[in-house]
Image (tube, rainbow, N blue to C red):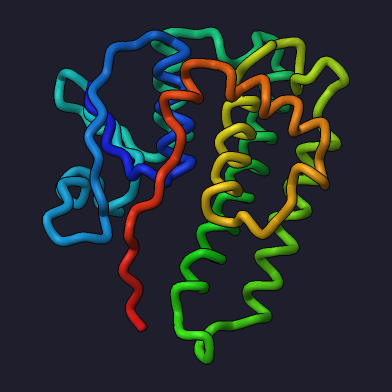
Amino acid sequence: MKLYIATPSPFARKVRVTLLEKQMPHEIIIDNPWQPGSRVKDLNPLAKIPTLVLDDGRVIHDSKVIFEYLELERPGHLPENNDDKITHRLIEVVADGVCDAVVMTFLEGQRPEGSRSHYWLSRQAEKIRAGVHELERKLLPSGSFTALDIGLAEIATGCALGYLDLRYPSYDWRGDAPNLLKLFDKLTKRASFQQTVPTAQKVPVNQ
């Protein structure tokens, strides 16, 4: 398998962590859909990261769909109980929503100061904080979201928190969510998270 990623992407990181946790052989190809010559544009009609190319040539895109494929191939990161499975999916939605709001904030911040919408930025900030508070509220005293020690919910949450550190460092989520901090500290000790720390890539913005 070949996984096309952008180095900052929390959605690509979610897939990378899953692949490493499942010990599934794969090749990482770094791409930047914003730049001319991006290969992803030829593989994914939406030109978005992550995109997974299977050994037989089939292409799967969107981190949620890619995770579903990986879980079907090698189960273990979703609970068997349906209620708990829904919990993991809902946590993923919140974590991904936080990431979406951070992306919108980052892109708006690339515009000249006089062209930025402070109303838009404040709306995104509200979403980010509300999402983090919800994740903190849903975390069990055990340090996980269900009886499963590390699954989709924990992976998605860890990737979202790591993305906050990269793209939205002004927000002290650690002070807002001390229990999430404990989860994050646990996750960052795992090889899968240590090997996938996000780094910045230049994103040109049409001003």
Front residue (pair 69, 115) = 115
Q: Residue at x 57, y 49 (%)?
A: 99
Q: Residue at x 81, y 28 (%)?
A: 139
User: Above or below — where is 149 with respect to 112?
Assistant: above
Q: Quadrant of the N terminus?
A: top left
Residue 206 rendering spot, x and y as whole percentages:
33, 78
Badge count:
0
Residue 133 rendering spot, x and y as whole percentages:
81, 46
Q: Quadrant of the C terminus?
A: bottom left
Q: Residue at x 59, y 83 (%)?
A: 117
Front residue (pair 86, 27) = 27
User: Above or below — where is 116 with respect to 158?
Assistant: below
Q: Residue at x 27, y 60 (%)?
A: 34
Residue 76 rendering spot, x and y as whole percentages:
54, 8
Residue 154 rendering spot, x and y as whole percentages:
64, 25
Quadrant in the rendering for residue 183: top right
| Residue farthest along the left direction in this orientation | 37
Left of 152 or right of it: where is 202? left
User: Above or below — where is 127 with respect to 25?
Assistant: below
Quadrant in the rendering for residue 62: top left
